[in-house]
Structure formats: structure tokens, C-alpha cells
Image: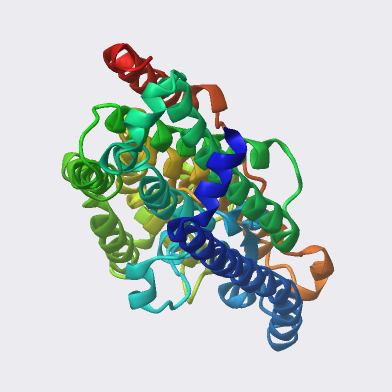
Amino acid sequence: MYPLLIKQFFRSKTVLLAFGILMVLGFLSIGTGKQFLNQKQEVIAKTEVLQEKHIKKQTNLHKDDLGLLMYYLKFSFINPVNSLAGISIGQSDLNSHIQNVTILNLEGQKYDTDLVNPMKLSVGNLDISFLIIFLFPLIIIALNFNVLSEEEENGTWKLITIQGKSTFKFLLQKIAIRLIFVAIILGLLFFLAKIILGIPFNKPFLQIIIISYLYILFWFSICFFIILFKKSSNTNAIVLLSTWLVLVVILPVLVNNYITNKYPVEEAFTMTIKQRDEYHKKWDTDKRETLDKFYAHYPQFSHYKLQEEGFSWLWYYAMQQMGDDESKQERDAMYSKIEKRESLSKKIAQFFPPLQVQLSMNAIANTSLTDQVAFLNATTKFHEELRLQFYPKIFDKKAANSIDWKQYKPVFYKSKTTFNLYDNILYMSCIILLLIGFGVLKNLKHFT
């Protein structure tokens, strides 16, 4: 029976069309990921060269005044791109992965990013995660919506029943052929992605593969559940396409709007304004008041006394510091709300596999908003370390050439992932089992 069913399956024009669409779009999605990774890696390589040139140029221009030199000098903090980002780009095309910071107030520097075509951002990227989440379900629906109804509409179902063979087993064989076909295509795309994108076969890559196959199985279980109601092909197609539209398109929009309204991040604007205002106000504020706040933040520098006459780098950098300190409350509130958004998204997504898969892939590839916030927090720590290194030298009026500038290379951020595969596949696995179980229990009596 299997050979005949396989021949019948591959004679269908739908199968050839599905194979062609998935392979063409698969190559395009891998190409998109490769282009993205190449662009990011090229920028990183240039950054390493440019920082060395930048330091050399600025130290030659400002040899005598370290305070003035540090006004211009920038240091690079790099978030290296994970090769898995070629599979799930997430928000890494929007957020900067390189922070070039001076020791001036930081909050005004954190959110500088590359100029990107807004039309491209609104459309999004055709990466493999998009292909799996949005297009694979449509192919699965196209292959399965008439797997039973077609037999009944063509009059062959009665013939199978008369022959005395297990009709339920026959149905499972037809679905199994389609499942193996889709699984092979998905496996081929992952194999090509591994080679072309240079992805090591490690635990994160294996996690993405497991989640993807489980998601494919989820859509097969939906099709299995619907077709067992023995409705017409047109009815099955409408129901399945409506299910796809709700789960993949409508629900994510509704969830996003709900979370955005529940945790509005108005602090993003007020933080920027306050940081700028507090810095500029210090020009008209008594210098002693500014220094007192600075000493409270850094008691180890309290022995440096204010220069009463003329310009003082101690006062200037204290003023810069206050711009960050005064906006800290807004910054912490903004990051707290972002964390709450992400936490709520993960809780809701547990019951909606398309959302779950997208968030999981972004988390594994380190391209989520949570990863970007972690990088920005690490940037704050990096910036603070720079200040603690250079403040004493500036206040002691050290010469610029007294410092070994060759040691200042771009620093690479080491990301930490807390992704747990079991937690992220538990609910989807339960949904799959429930769909298959309910379908079988409700309709088994109709099969022999």
C-alpha cells in the first residue's frame, strides 16, 4: 500500500509546487541570513581597525590635555553576532550591536544606531524562522486539507472500506507520507543553513531544530484534528486557513497591542529629555553643588578639590556624570517595564505555538529584546569601568602620552542565555497530544 500511496502523492501538482516554493524561499531565507551575518561581521572587523586609527589620531592631536582628549576619545564595546542570528534575525537588525562610547554622559550615546531603510524594517526579513512560522503551515494545510475528503468526494473511500482494510491505518499512512516529505525539506534547509551560515552543530542549534520539528508536528496535528470531522474539502480549507490566520497573524497583533498598552514605556522619552536637561542645567548651577553630588557618587574622588578660577575638568566631568545620575530612575523604570513585557509575552506565548516558536528562536539566537537590554546594561558597566580608569588620571592632570594606548582594544560582550528547552516545548507538546487524542477518541468509531 505504501508504494502506491507514495506514487499517488508525488504525482500531485500540489506536491511539486510545495517543494518548489519551500526550496526557492528556503534559499532566499538562507541568503538573507548570510547577507545579514556578513554585514555585521564586516562592521565588527572595521570597528577593530578604526578604533586603533581613532585613538592614534586623537592622541596626536591632544597630547598635552588628557581631559580634552577624553572628550573626543571613543571606545568600542561589541556584541558579537551569533551565527544562529542568520536563522532568526529577530530585533538585531534594528538594535545596534556596537556601542562607541566616550566617558561623557552615557544615556545620550546608548541608543545611537545605524540608519536603516524604514520600509525594510516594516516589511521585516525573510529569514528561516519566518519561513517556518508563516509559510510551512500553509504548505502543510495545502497538503492535508483534502487527504480524507478527496477520497470520499471521488468515491474511492467506500472501495477502501469494502476491501476490509483498516481505513484509519490508511489515513495515517497518507498523513505520515506528507509528514516525512515536509520533515525532509525542513531537514535539508537546516543542513544548507548549517553549511552556508557556518553554524556549529551545538546545543542551541539542536534546540532550534527540535522546536521547529515540534512546530511542524503541531500543524499536522491541527490538520489531523480537522479532517477527522469528515467535512468537505472546501470546509476543511476554510477552517484551516482561518486557524492559520488567527494563530499566526491576528493573535500576535492582539497580544502585542495588549502588552504595549499594559506596560507603556513613556520613560524612554522622559529619560532622554531629563538626561539632557539635567546636564545643561548644570552650566547655570553652582559648581559646588554639582561637586557635592559627584563626591556622594564617588567618595574615593573627594580629595580632588574644585579649581575656583578658570575652567575645571573635575567640574565638567562631574556635570556629565550628573546627567546620567539624574536620569537613572527613568532608565531603571524603562528597563523594568521592558522585562515585564518580555515576561508577559512568554507566559501568553506558551499557549500559542507560533508566538512560542518566534520568542524561543530569538532567545536561542540572542536576538531578542531581552538580549539587547542585557547588552545595554553591560555597556553601562563597561562605561563605568572606563570612567574609573580615566577620572583619576584626568584629575591628576596626567599627560596623554603617559598612558599605554595600545592596550585599549575593542571589548567583546559575552552573552548569557537562560533558555530552557523543556519549559518552552512542554505546553506545545501537550497541545499536540490533546489535538491528536481528542481527534482519535471522537472519530475512531467511524473507522474500521
Q: Which of 221 and 274 is in front in this view?
A: 221
Quadrant of the snapshot with the N terminus: top right
The reply to whether residue 379 is in sight is yes
- The furthest residue to the bottom: 61
The reply to whether residue 381 is in sight is no
- In this picture, residue 446 sits left or right of residue 172: left
Residue 189, above or below 354 = below
Residue drawn at x 66%, y 78% as measured from the top left: 65
Image coords of residue 2 (percent x, y) = 59, 35
- In this picture, residue 397 sits left or right of residue 381: right
Instruction: Please say which color scheme the image uses.
Output: rainbow
Image coords of residue 265 (percent x, y) = 24, 49
Q: Nearer the viewer, residue 437 or 133?
A: 437
Quadrant of the snapshot with the C terminus: top left
- In this picture, residue 389 sits left or right of residue 435: right
Image coords of residue 346 (percent x, y) = 37, 33
Residue 427, above or below 303 = above
Q: Nearer the viewer, residue 364 or 240?
A: 240
Image coords of residue 368 (percent x, y) = 47, 48
Query: How many numbered discs, if any?
Result: 0
Residue drawn at x 51%, y 48% as measured from the top left: 8
Residue drawn at x 54%, y 53% as measured from the top left: 10
Q: Which of 68 and 236 is in front in this view?
A: 236
